[in-house]
Amino acid sequence: MSKKTHKDFFCNAIDRRLSGLHEDPWLAQRIMNSKKGKVTMKRKFKKAPVVAFTVIGCLLASVTVAAAADKLGIIHLFSDGNTTNTNITDGIQTLEPQSQNNDKITSSLYEGENVCFTVNEALYDSIGETYALNWTIENLNEHEDLYIICKGIYFGNESTHQRTTSNYTNFILETGTTECMALGELPENDSNECRMDFIVLRATAPFAVITAESSSEGLQTEATRLRSEGYIPVDGMGIVCDIPISERGYAEELLASGDFEIAESFSLNFTLEQDKLDDTARVYNGPTEFVFDDYEIRIRSAICTATAIYIDVEYITPEAPKNGGKGVGWLWGVQFDVPGLESFTGNAGGYIHDPILLEDGRYMNLYEYEALQLYTQPDTLRMTLVTYDENLNPVNVYSDDAIELKFE
């Protein structure tokens, strides 16, 4: 478990709703934050790159390729079709451009010579361990050669982990105003002091976009050719191609290439309210052991807030579950759905631990599941075991054994 020190926030919120609850619902051994590279994520807003040999517009002198979001707002991160998570509404914070807190002036606004950054809305869920930010970037001089890099979003000087983003970093700035969004995981320090670090680069050569599908080798070849002709190659997301990854950082590599110079460099600093969503905390307090013909399911913990769900499930079998090997993994999983809804989350995944031999000779696999960016905060979540073959095709969907988790 990511043993966050805000356990008291959770317990207090639950006590307000469930006066008869005696157990501590925060006993789940959740380790998501330490295994981020192993969590499967669905990126709802971030667009997939498109790679190609040809260059649009006969090597356009300047091309913008990061689409501006159209008045999204944080509520749209938590909406899907006709489904909108209204439980987050009271938690959305509107930020003042400047404020003073304990003699410290904080600002969610930056006005420079080339750009104006304004943080408009924020969401902070201390129990769900998530946050969301909405900001706009105004291109003050309508330049088409500016490249935006977010060096990071921090709380209490600790970096956050981004899960869903829109126009977040590494893109060519359009003319006019571009709306941006980020939803991520809070660090473990419980700080509500946020800092966003940005660098705005100016290109010293025109951009050229690589647009049609090809192999990675084709991308490299085409990027090399474009550079030889005096262009900066970018892919369909506006990310500069063939820049090596190094310890000194992406922005530093871009500057070292000679293709960019610094136009602006700044930080935004502001304070968020911590407890606006505490009352949305819910726990599953029903049966925890479910015995079926050839397997058993145990619920270690199941927690949900307005923005996130965390569930730890034990899958117990007479023999160790099959493993499909590297790139495939364990050939079983658990599907979660909300009855009556096609989709309830825009960003979910999990991690299955290696099986442990129990004293009775059976094997136990622990599955740690998390869902962020909820389109609804469910009262009931249905959990269904699924087993797969080596090609990840479902072999058995145990619909008759589905378990309903009711959150109170």
Image: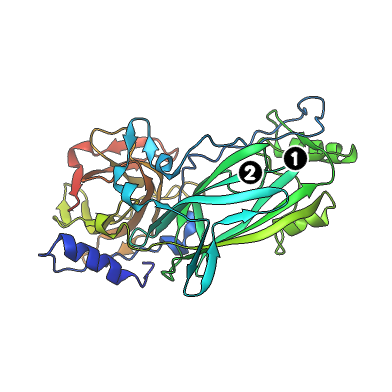
Q: Residue, x 48% and y 58% (percent of image)? A: 36
Residue type of the residue flagged with mark 2: Glu
Indicate the quadrant containing the N terminus: top left, top right, bottom left or bottom right. bottom left
Q: Residue, x 58% and y 48% (percent of image)? A: 168
Q: Is residue 50 above or below residue 195?
A: above
Residue type of the residue flagged with mark 1: His
Label 1 neighbourhood size at 10 Å, few (<14), some (14-19), many (20+)? some
- Find numbered disc 2 in the image and state the secondary structure of the residue it sits on: strand
Visible residue check, residue 315 = no
- Find numbered disc 1 in the image and state the secondary structure of the residue it sits on: loop
Earlier sequence position, callout 2 versus callout 1? 2
Q: Which residue is mark 2?
A: 138
Q: Which residue is mark 1?
A: 143
The answer for how far apart the CA atoms under marks 2 and 1 are is 11 Å
* Horizontal arrangement in the rendering, residue 300 relative to residue 161 (left or right): left
Q: Nearer the viewer, residue 225 or 135?
A: 135
Return the x and y of residue 352 as percentages of the image width and height.
Answer: 38, 55
